[in-house]
């Protein structure tokens, strides 16, 4: 175990964890989910979910990883009590990471394609521009080529290890992402739609909130914080020494939420300035925005900055998804990191081909949608629920307090993790499987 790679600095860990958290979930999913659910009222619910469930579970995952110094499967086995096979939670997490990355890599491939097109600039009529997306989807070899490119890039980064690969890349890409985002916010502030966007994002209209909004808020917060499948357990396992877990979790969740909000602040002014509906759905960044980029002054540069930003965010998340599976193979089967990477990279690449060929489907649902549904609607909340239960009921208070501390804030977090989070997660899960 002494040969385990560790983060070089606390900042490195925070940036890598933020890199995992900030991804397509923040920039692509969050704005359209907010748009669909009526704006700021949804943001309030989302914030409540982050505070009551997201941060407590984030603390729990980092704790489980740091304490055990193992991959998710080994970590849950480490806390084994009684006869229930805790390690199954870890296996489900590894599988979930493999499933998510298989389609995440395909979507990241689309971003690469749009970034390349941005360098030339978008031009043509609205229909022509939105057809780019339809054409891309109808060209399997192109999708497979981009998917391959993304997988090779991700594998090449993490082949260098935790400290020299993940930490180094996060330290470069995360500040770059911050700069690009701030530049885009400054640009968005100058647009005529900024006033409407600000109003939309900050003036709550609770009449648009439905019971489904609560579930969507919890699901989205879980996905964007990379919870429920062991990514934060894995990153926590590369921590050693004295680290304030609660403080780290609050920092990671705050930056993640801020970036999601700022992404909305970039996207909505563009949408409102052009008189469009904010609820355009998943096609928002691939169909709507490029049309707007083609029309606005300086749109060429803005689109390059925008797609580069999304690409950086997606790559650092993809890294954390594959790292879960790689750390599992390395720890459990004692093989070299390189060998584990080749095996897992190939498995995920092959699985991703199902999502890359959009004409393949199961009963009319594409593999991409199917995998997203299975992973983010069922596996993540269920994984989070099991993690909270193990932490709340199988680990002694003394053990927890030695790492998490006994300040009033830590005690409140431990209470939330034991009682509030599992109940809310159970409700989401039961609703998802249609039990009420
Ligand atoms: N948090 C990432 C995003 O917002 C996705 C992700 C989910 C990454 C689960 C790792 C684990 O895009």
Image: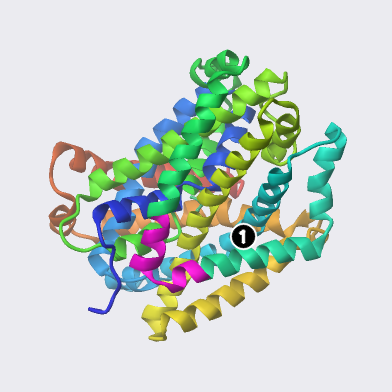
Name the residue that disc number 1 marks: 105
Quadrant, the C terminus: top right
In percent of width and height, residue 122 lies at 76, 39
Q: Can the viewer see residue 226 in this picture? A: no
| Near-viewer residue (223 or 336) | 336
Does the magenta segment cover residue 163? Answer: yes
What residue appears at the point 23 percent right and 60 percent down from the top-left corner? 395
Is ligand 1 within 8 Å of the beta carbon of the residue shown at mark 1?
no
Q: What coloring was used for the rendering?
A: rainbow
Q: Can the viewer see residue 136 in this picture? A: yes
| Near-viewer residue (214 or 39) | 39
Callout 1: SS: helix
In percent of width and height, residue 387 lies at 37, 57
Q: Is residue 423 above or below residue 206?
A: below
Does the magenta segment cover residue 83? Answer: no
In percent of width and height, residue 432 lies at 58, 47
Quadrant, the N terminus: bottom left
Q: Is residue 281 left or right of residue 221?
A: right
What residue appears at the point 36 percent right and 37 percent down from the top-left corner? 254
What residue appears at the point 67 percent right and 73 percent down from the top-left corner? 350
Q: Is residue 83 left or right of residue 222?
A: left
- Determine the main secondary structure of the stretch shown in magenta: helix
Q: Is residue 398 above or below residue 224?
A: below
Q: Is residue 360 above or below residue 225?
A: below
Span highlighted in magenta in the image? 156-170
Q: Quadrant of residue 267?
A: top right
Q: Is residue 186 left or right of residue 408?
A: right
In percent of width and height, residue 215 lies at 53, 38
Question: How many discs mark residues in the rendered view?
Answer: 1
């Amino acid at each position: 175990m002494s040969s385990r790679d560790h983060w070089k600095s606390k900042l490195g860990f925070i940036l890598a964890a933020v890199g995992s958290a900030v991804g397509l979930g923040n920039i692509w999913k969050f704005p359209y989910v907010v748009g669909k659910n009526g704006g700021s009222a949804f943001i309030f619910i989302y914030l409540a979910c982050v505070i009551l469930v997201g941060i407590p579970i984030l603390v729990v995952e980092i704790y489980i990883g740091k304490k055990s110094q193992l991959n998710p499967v080994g970590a849950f086995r480490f806390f084994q009590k009684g006869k229930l096979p805790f390690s199954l939670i870890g296996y489900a997490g590894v599988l979930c990471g493999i499933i998510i990355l298989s389609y995440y890599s395909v979507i990241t491939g689309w971003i690469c394609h749009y970034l390349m097109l941005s360098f030339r600039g978008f031009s043509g009529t609205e229909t022509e521009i939105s057809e780019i997306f339809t054409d891309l989807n109808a060209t399997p070899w192109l999708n497979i080529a981009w998917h391959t490119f993304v997988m090779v890039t991700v594998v090449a980064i993490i082949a260098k290890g935790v400290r020299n690969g993940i930490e180094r890349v996060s330290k470069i890409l995360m500040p770059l992402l911050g700069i690009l985002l701030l530049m885009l916010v400054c640009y968005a502030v100058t647009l005529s739609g900024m006033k409407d966007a600000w109003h939309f994002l900050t003036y709550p209209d609770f009449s648009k909130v439905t019971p489904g909004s609560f579930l969507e808020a919890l699901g989205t917060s879980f996905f964007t914080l990379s919870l429920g499948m062991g990514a934060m357990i894995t990153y926590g396992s590369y921590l050693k020494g004295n680290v304030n877990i609660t403080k780290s979790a609050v920092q990671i969740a705050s930056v993640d939420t801020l970036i999601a909000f700022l992404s909305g602040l970039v996207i909505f002014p563009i949408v409102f300035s052009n008189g469009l509906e904010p609820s355009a759905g998943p096609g928002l960044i691939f169909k709507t925005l490029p049309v707007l980029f083609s029309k606005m002054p300086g749109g060429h540069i803005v689109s390059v900055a925008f797609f580069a930003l999304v690409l950086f965010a997606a790559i650092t998340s993809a890294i954390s998804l594959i790292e879960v599976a790689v750390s599992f193979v390395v720890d459990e089967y004692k093989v070299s990191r390189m060998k584990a990477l080749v095996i897992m990279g190939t498995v995920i690449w092959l699985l991703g081909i199902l999502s890359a060929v959009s004409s393949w489907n199961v009963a009319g649902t594409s593999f991409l949608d199917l995998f997203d549904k299975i992973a983010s609607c069922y596996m993540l909340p269920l994984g989070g629920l099991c993690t909270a239960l193990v932490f709340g009921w199988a680990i002694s208070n003394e053990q927890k307090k030695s790492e998490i501390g006994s300040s009033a804030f830590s005690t409140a977090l431990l209470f939330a993790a034991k009682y509030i989070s599992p109940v809310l997660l159970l409700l989401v899960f039961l609703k998802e499987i249609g039990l009420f």
